[in-house]
Amino acid sequence: MKKILFLLTVLMFWACSDGNKPLSNDEKNKIINETKATIATIIQTCETPDPELLKSFYINSPDFVSMVGGQYAEYEQSLKNVDGYFANVASQKSTIRNEKYVVLDVSTVLYTADSSWEVNLKNDTTLIMDPAGMQFLLKKVANEWKVLSWTEEAIMKQ
């Protein structure tokens, strides 16, 4: 009888625990502020450009994926794509028109932005990407926000 009572007590405690408790608004705001700093740094590294710093935000994982301009790439190919793109870029300037941060859980945030980019190439050509949609899936790894997935689609104008 004691075993059954003990088992029922454990089951009731487990069923009533708040292990899946939703995040409070304060917790969500704290996470959003952390990821805003990461996004600001990512955008700055794209504008400068600093491809090595940008690539340091990518999670080296078999789950990593990017989709840029309709082209699917996993981690290693994404690194090569960044190098190839920035080999031709002198500078960029972004304008974020609208953005949204969705906190999926304590270590996962979905960032979406409507933007435009002015891209100054090394051959003195200027490209305008407008509109440019961006979406990043950010994960907190070793207490740092990193990119697990990157999607970008833009209309190019010259």
Image: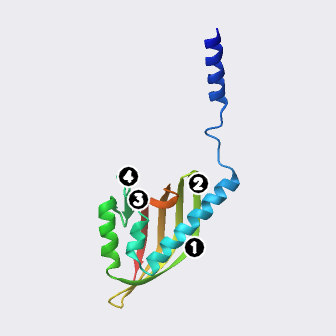
Camera-side mark, 1 or 4: 4
Q: Quadrant of the N terminus?
A: top right
Amino acid type of disc 2? Answer: Val
| Rendered residue at 52%/68% (across/down) | 39
Q: Which mark is residue 59?
A: 3
Task: Mark 2 or mark 1: name the one nearer the start of the chain.
Answer: 1
Q: Nearer the viewer, residue 52 or 79?
A: 52
CA gap, disc 2 and disc 3: 19 Å
Across and down, in percent, residue 22 comes to 65, 45
Amino acid type of disc 3? Answer: Ile
Assign a secondary structure to mark 2.
strand
Q: Are marks 3 and 4 in contact (CB under 8 Å)?
A: yes
Camera-side mark, 3 or 4: 3
CA gap, disc 1 and disc 3: 27 Å
| Rendered residue at 66%/27% (across/down) | 13
CA gap, disc 2 and disc 4: 19 Å
Assign a secondary structure to mark 4.
loop
Assign a secondary structure to mark 3.
loop
CA gap, disc 1 and disc 4: 30 Å
Q: Are marks 1 and 3 in contact (CB under 8 Å)?
A: no
Neighbor class of circle 2 (other Cα within 10 Å; few <14, some 14-19, many 20+) is some
125 to 131, vertically: above or below: below
Q: Which mark is residue 63?
A: 4
Camera-side mark, 2 or 1: 2
| Rendered residue at 44%/65% (across/down) | 57
Camera-side mark, 1 or 3: 3
119 to 11, vertically: above or below: below
